[in-house]
Amino acid sequence: MELVDKIIEKGNLDVEKILLEAKEKANDERTTILDEAKKDYSQKINTVRKDSQKEIKTKERLLFFETKQAELLAKQSVIDDVFKKVEEKITNLIDDDLLDYVYKSLKKEELVGNEIFYTNKEEYKKFLKALSSETAKKSVDLDKLNALLKTKLVLSNQPIDVKGGFIIESKDFDLNFTIEEVISKLREKHEGSIIKELFE
């Protein structure tokens, strides 16, 4: 029986040894799996953080550009309002103020003396009253204006298709003083300085 007891005892020791090795191997594998899981988790967290930071930076940039765009639109709206008011002021000129405006517009031009003054149907009477002492007819001597300019302009009763203002026509050239052209030139000349004055 001693032999059997020794075999059983040796078998029990082998079993304990195997169990102990299995436990150690299981612990090692458990540690390896946990370490890999922690590493994977850490990488995923870092990736999420980087992606979040990129997204935040992208949204910050987008917000910055949207803010700049809104500022530019607001500034453009203010500038548009300034020139709209100038347009209204010019359009609403009458009598001596209108005569003075037309005179100042034309005094730097080299007029020959046989030019024809055209305007639209809506403003014909306003220009006639301001620039001439005569009554409406096919071709009216602009005596008030001619006295200032020392020329012989006549106002045609043939309307032109413009929003406002006037055109001077001769055989060799045309001068465009329509409201669109005047505002365009004023804008080109003064917009930069207005922007500096208002926004800087």
Image: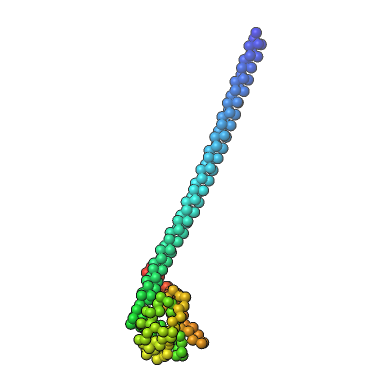
- Residue 20 visible in the shown view: yes
Q: Residue at x 55, y 33 (%)?
A: 31
Q: Examine the rendered structure and indicate whether residue 155 appears above or below residue 53.
A: below
Q: Residue at x 46, y 59 (%)?
A: 65
Q: Nearer the viewer, residue 65 or 145?
A: 145
Q: Position of residue 137 (x, y in %)?
A: 41, 84
Q: Residue at x 60, y 29 (%)?
A: 25
Q: Nearer the viewer, residue 77 or 3?
A: 77
Q: Residue furthest top?
A: 1
Q: Examine the rendered structure and indicate whether residue 49 appears above or below residue 63.
A: above
Could you tell me which quadrant the C terminus lies in? bottom left
Q: Position of residue 187 (x, y in %)?
A: 43, 74
User: Quarter of the image holding residue 5?
Assistant: top right
Q: Position of residue 70 (x, y in %)?
A: 43, 60
Side (left or right) of 122 relative to 7: left
Q: Position of residue 159 (x, y in %)?
A: 45, 78
Could you tell me which quadrant the N terminus lies in? top right
Q: Residue at x 37, y 86 (%)?
A: 134
- Residue 177 visible in the shown view: no
Q: Residue furthest left?
A: 96
Q: Examine the rendered structure and indicate whether residue 77 appears above or below residue 55.
A: below
Q: Nearer the viewer, residue 121 or 181?
A: 121
- Number of numbered discs on residues: 0
